[in-house]
């Protein structure tokens, strides 16, 4: 006579048991790089597949990463604008605005408040580095910084408000999704 074990099998063992008669579904296979998919009658090439995959990626910037990202982007825009025109201006503002919007989109859900908070800090740091001192030494550099802060305030407010609006909308969507679960 055969004796059966008194222990119950683990649920995660993968073997079919009386409680779970069906095996696990197989993982979907990845398409080759050059394959095209037809969805809704429109062919999609490898570039569009990559863009769609990028759009579905989860946000990955931490709070500190958000501040570093905005600062580096604003520094790059300010340096390019300083090389072209001699002082930070429109190019600096546009790059800063786009960096703030991207930071609001790609920051982690737990760090959403970091995007609008780090924007003014990054703006000031980037402007302090790229401000035109006009040969006046430290005092001239401080005056260039204050002038830049006064004349580029619209870009600062636009980037900060844009990041705040995106972060708030993402927070509301996150809370609604969690309530549904």
Image: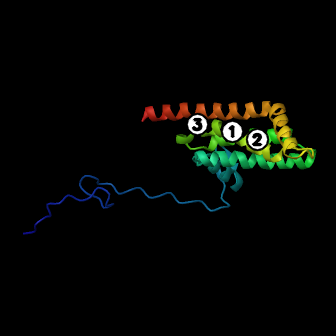
Inter-mark Cα distance, 2 to 1: 8 Å
Instruction: Reply above or below: 148 against 81.
Output: above
Residue 153, by quadrant, is top right
Q: Which residue is at 84% across, 45% downward?
A: 138
Which residue position holds label 3? 113
In the rendered image, residue 87, in percent from the top left (x then y), is placed at: 89, 43
Q: Is residue 92 left or right of residue 67?
A: right
| Numbered tag placed on residue 119 in the rendering | 1
Identify the element where label 1 is drawn.
Answer: helix
Q: Are marks 2 and 1 in contact (CB under 8 Å)?
A: yes
Nearer to me, 44 or 170: 170
Disc 2 secondary structure class: helix
The answer to whether any part of residue 49 appears in the image is yes
Q: Is residue 72 left or right of residue 60?
A: right
Q: Earlier in the sequence, mark 1 or mark 3?
A: 3
Residue 27 x, y percent position in the rendering = 47, 58
Q: Which residue is mark 2?
A: 96
Q: How is the image coloured?
A: rainbow
Residue 24: percent from left, percent from top: 38, 56
Question: Farthest left residue?
Answer: 1
**Disc on the earlier residue, 2 or 3:** 2
For label 1, the crowd category at 10 Å Cα-Cα, with few meaning under 14, some 14 to 19 and many 20 or more, is: many
Give the residue at x 70% y 45%.
Answer: 70
């Amino acid at each position: 006579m055969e004796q059966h074990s008194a222990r119950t099998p683990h649920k995660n063992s993968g073997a079919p048991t009386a409680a779970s008669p069906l095996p696990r579904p197989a993982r979907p296979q990845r398409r080759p790089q050059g394959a095209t998919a037809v969805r809704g009658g429109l062919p999609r090439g490898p570039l569009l597949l990559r863009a769609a995959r990028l759009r579905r990626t989860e946000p990955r910037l931490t709070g500190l990463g958000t501040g570093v990202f905005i600062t580096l982007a604003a520094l790059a825009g300010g340096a390019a604008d300083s090389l072209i025109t001699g002082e930070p201006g429109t190019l600096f503002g546009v790059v800063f605005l786009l960096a703030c919007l991207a930071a609001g989109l790609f920051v982690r859900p737990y760090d959403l408040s970091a995007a609008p908070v780090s924007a003014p800090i990054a703006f000031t740091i980037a402007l302090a580095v790229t401000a035109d001192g006009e040969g006046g030494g430290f005092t001239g550099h401080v005056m260039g910084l204050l002038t830049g802060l006064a004349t580029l305030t619209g870009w600062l407010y636009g980037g900060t408000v844009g990041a705040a609006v995106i972060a708030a909308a993402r927070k509301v969507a996150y809370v609604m999704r969690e309530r549904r679960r």
